[in-house]
Image (cartoon, grey):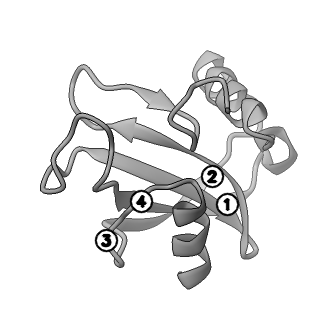
Amino acid sequence: EDDILSFISNYGWQVDDAPVEVRDVIIPESFDDVYNNYNQIQLAQGFNLEKYAGMRVKRWTYIIRNYPGTLPTDDFIRINILVSDGVVIGGDVCSVKLDGFMHGFYLSTDGE
């Protein structure tokens, strides 16, 4: 967990020390449009979930407290970190609001 917190802080995000959720997820064997689009986010940031198709991985979810335009008390911006065998294999930053968004770990959607 400390390694995950360090990983997150390397992108400039401030999160609570404890995740709001840790759960097992299965990367699908074959990708539909949703997973293909999600993997495009991963490819843009140097990851590729195709290598993990059909595998069970852990998803760690934290609340981001310093997202631009939000207050530190807001709890709707999340960072999801996908981990396999102790290695980060991908993830995203997203809003859980109805009109939310999703992008890679960097604030900029182009990975810079």
Q: Mark 4 is on which residue type?
A: Thr
From the image, tell me which residue sits under label 2: 26
Looking at marks 4 and 2 on the same chain, the residue that comes earlier in the sequence is marked by 2
Could you tell me residue 12's position as x and y percent? 50, 55
Whichever of labels 4 and 3 marks the residue nearer the N terminus, that label is 3
- The circle drawn on residue 16 is 3
For label 4, the crowd category at 10 Å Cα-Cα, with few meaning under 14, some 14 to 19 and many 20 or more, is: many
94 to 74, vertically: above or below:
above
> Type of residue at label 1?
Arg
The CA distance from mark 1 to mark 4 is 16 Å
Q: Are marks 1 and 2 in contact (CB under 8 Å)?
A: yes
Q: What whole-number distance in Å separates the C-alpha atoms at marks 4 and 3?
A: 10 Å
Q: Depth check: give the residue in front, 111 or 20.
A: 111
Is 9 located above or below residue 66 in the figure?
A: below
Q: Badge 4 is on which residue? A: 61
Sequence-first tag of 2 and 3: 3
**Circle nearer the N terminus (3, 1):** 3
Image coordinates of residue 21 in percent, x first then y, are 36, 65
Dot 1 and dot 4 residues touching (CB under 8 Å) = no
Q: Secondary structure at mark 3?
A: loop
| Structural crowding at the residue carrying mark 3, measured as other residues with C-alpha within 10 Å and reported as few (<14), some (14–19) or many (≥20) | few
Amino acid type, mark 2: Ile
| Callout 4: SS | strand
Tag in front: 3 or 1: 3
The residue wearing badge 1 is 56
Q: Residue at the far right: name it.
A: 51
